[in-house]
Amino acid sequence: MNIEIKVDDITLSTVVGDVVDFDEDGDAVSTGRERTVADLVAAQIVNQVVRDARYPSLVDQVTRIRDEEIRAAVKPAIEQAINRPIRKTNYYGEATGEETTLTEVIVEEARKLLKEPADNYRREQGTVLQQTVRAEVKRAFEAEIADAVKQARDLVAAELGDTVSAQIAAAVKAGLKAK
């Protein structure tokens, strides 16, 4: 008796099954796609790479490289958009005035913002710029004052600490002599 087994050539594109998904009821539904040997190999490689301790640093490195490439690709378009002449338009999209650049428009809007009142109903509070400067000055003074108070407190604690410890020692000696 002679048993002969014949195995067809297996390649990465050999189909090994159907891709099955599940619907909202939890029933298996065929997606119409087929799973190949390449899909199974790729899944095993991904599982091994994800379990590796070096995976988080690899993700960070790939993300950093991706971000650099995106910046490099987008930078010329941004520079062109900023420096290319544009014409202002009115509410209806009709050109008004002379040509300008996006940079000039941004600077003009920033100047307007800094000069306008922080609160249109209470103008005595000042402009956006004035309030920003006030907040920064206040923050700087608060930090300086807190530091000065801390230094003074440390000096007082050091002086009182020596005086109090001397008084306690004298009271303990007096108590021991009385016995």
Image (spheres, rainbow, N blue to C red):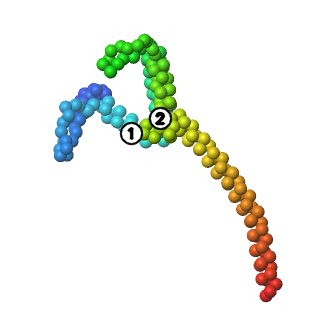
- Amino acid type, callout 2: Pro
- Binning the other alpha carbons within 10 Å of mark 1 as few (below 14), some (14 to 19) or many (20 upward) gives few
Taking the spot 36% from the left edge, 13% from the top edge, the residue there is 95
User: Are the residues flagged by discs 2 and 1 in contact, CB closer than 8 Å?
Assistant: no
SS at circle 2: loop
Q: Can see residue 177? A: yes
Give residue 32's quadrant in the image: top left
Q: Nearer the viewer, residue 96 or 14?
A: 96
Task: Name the quarter where the C terminus is drawn.
Answer: bottom right
Taking the spot 38% from the left edge, 39% from the top edge, the residue there is 47
Taking the spot 21% from the left edge, 41% from the top edge, the residue there is 22
Label placed on residue 64: none
Tag 1 residue: 47
Q: Is residue 102 left or right of residue 140?
A: left
- Percent x, y for residue 87? 40, 14
SS at circle 1: helix
- Amino acid type, callout 1: Asn
- Percent x, y for residue 114? 50, 31
Tag 2 residue: 117
Q: Is residue 176 above or below residue 48?
A: below
- Percent x, y for residue 125? 50, 40
Give residue 13's quadrant in the image: top left
Q: Is residue 46 left or right of residue 1?
A: right
